[in-house]
Amino acid sequence: MMFLYSIIILFLGILINIPIGFCLLLASLIYIILLGDIPFSIVVHGMFAGVDNFVLLSVPFFILMGELMNQGGMTKKLFRFASALVGHLPGGLAYVNVIASMIFAGMSGSAVADVGGLGSIEIKAMLEDGYDREFSAGVTAASATIGPIIPPSIPIIIYGVYANVSIIELFVAGFLPGVLIGIVLMIYIYIISRRRKYPIHKKADFKELIRSFFDTLPSLLAPGLLVGGIISGVFTPTECGAAAAAYALFLTVIIYKEIKINELPLIFLKVAKVTAFVMLLVSAASVFSWLLVRGNITAIIAQGVLQLSTNYFFILALINILLLIVGCFIGPIEAIMIFLPVLYPIVTSVGINLIQFGIIMVFNLVIGLLTPPVASVLCLVSNISEIPFGKMCRAIIPFYIPLLIALLIITYTPISLILPNILFR
């Protein structure tokens, strides 16, 4: 009952837009006060313990990589290459939209960064080519869900830390599900494009394709070099983050010269602010999670769910529904830190693989970024495309079909375990 008061405080704080890190701390403090037998010093110790993890050092480096790639002209080059590759197919620019997002996902690891970097370019090009504004915006928003699945991915790093599973295996596990999401979206785009008779571009000649490929090659090499370096043991996931940032800095400042040296301090400041926000979340959530376990809340919830059923497929369906609802209100990182301690005993009790579950959990929560009332990706696309938020909500509805189909495949098949089993077993 006492913990229920803390939960109410937590969600009231979220509803009135108090930063969720402070909401978690406030809820934790309320619970400690109500219990009366826990010293307040446990909050400080818990916050420190939450961020005292070597792997978390990679977070600011991956954030920096995404920011540098975003501001360093990578997006235009990627879009030109993707256009030369598939722009001649029916609904070509919509395919370009998805493929560009798949490539950019290997650099940013964020749905919001994907939309912020590629969104305006993609939507403008599609509108100029005769595509419906709502369809263009819907494709852009839906394809952004690939960002946190294909590595590097900040939500996957946070999941790996909290679930105590290999970050390397999680990164590798995300590749095929990310490609699957792109393929399912492109099948849906093909069906719609044939019905609406969207324009077909002239096929790029071989010289143009090769030119755009080599222009984009340094960017295309980034994901392969980084993940390949981890798998081969050249560097750890943390060192991978530093290597990623250094490579992005080299590309954008030295090779492409899109970012000036005097612009770097502002970029570093922005990255520092984002990192501080993420680390506050991690430290606050670690205290909240400790209290969940100490109060036996996680065990009580697990027992309640398992009394309903211990069927593997039913439990997964129940978890998917819960996470899809949670994702409508809370961002992926916050949701992982709050709900993973609750779901962990349920998942392990029915034998769900924790690597596979990491991809399932992140994808569920990323779909939430497209779902009102919060829908941060939808809000950003609405702003870029100049579509009122209400119309934007209607525009994204058809794209839930391919996204949910992809979610079912990722949930009920071992697609996310194929590469980890090949490489690490």
Image: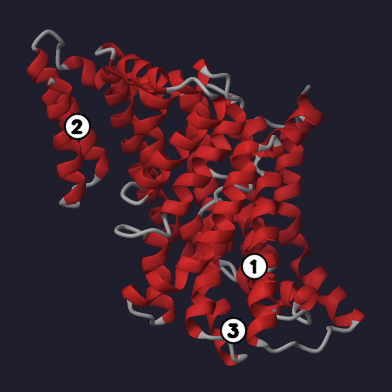
Badge 1: residue crowd in 10 Å (few <14, some 14–19, many ≥20): some
Residue 26 x, y percent position in the rendering: 16, 32
Three-letter code, disc 1: Tyr
Residue 412 in the figure: left or right of residue 345: right
At numbered mark 2, what does the secondary structure look like: helix, strand or loop? helix
* The quadrant where residue 392 appears: bottom left
At numbered mark 3, what does the secondary structure look like: helix, strand or loop? helix
Q: CA distance from mark 3 to mark 1?
A: 17 Å
Nearer the observer: mark 2 or 1; the answer is: 1
Q: Nearer the viewer, residue 129 or 352?
A: 352
Image point (56%, 51%), residue name: 109
* Label 2 close to label 1 by CB (< 8 Å): no
Q: CA distance from mark 3 to mark 2?
A: 45 Å
Nearer the observer: mark 3 or 1; the answer is: 1
Q: Nearer the viewer, residue 115 or 8?
A: 8
Badge 3: residue crowd in 10 Å (few <14, some 14–19, many ≥20): many
**In the rendered image of this protein, does residue 353 appear above or below residue 386?**
above
Residue 354 x, y percent position in the rendering: 57, 26
Residue 205 in the figure: left or right of residue 390: right
Counting residues from the start of the chain, the first of labels 2 and 1 encountered is 2
**In the rendered image of this protein, does residue 331 appear above or below residue 121?**
above
Residue 319 x, y percent position in the rendering: 45, 35
The mark found on residue 126 in the picture is: 3
Counting residues from the start of the chain, the first of labels 3 and 2 encountered is 2
Q: CA distance from mark 2 to mark 1?
A: 40 Å
Residue 154 in the figure: left or right of residue 80: left
Three-letter code, disc 2: Ile
Label 1: which residue?
188
Three-letter code, disc 3: Met
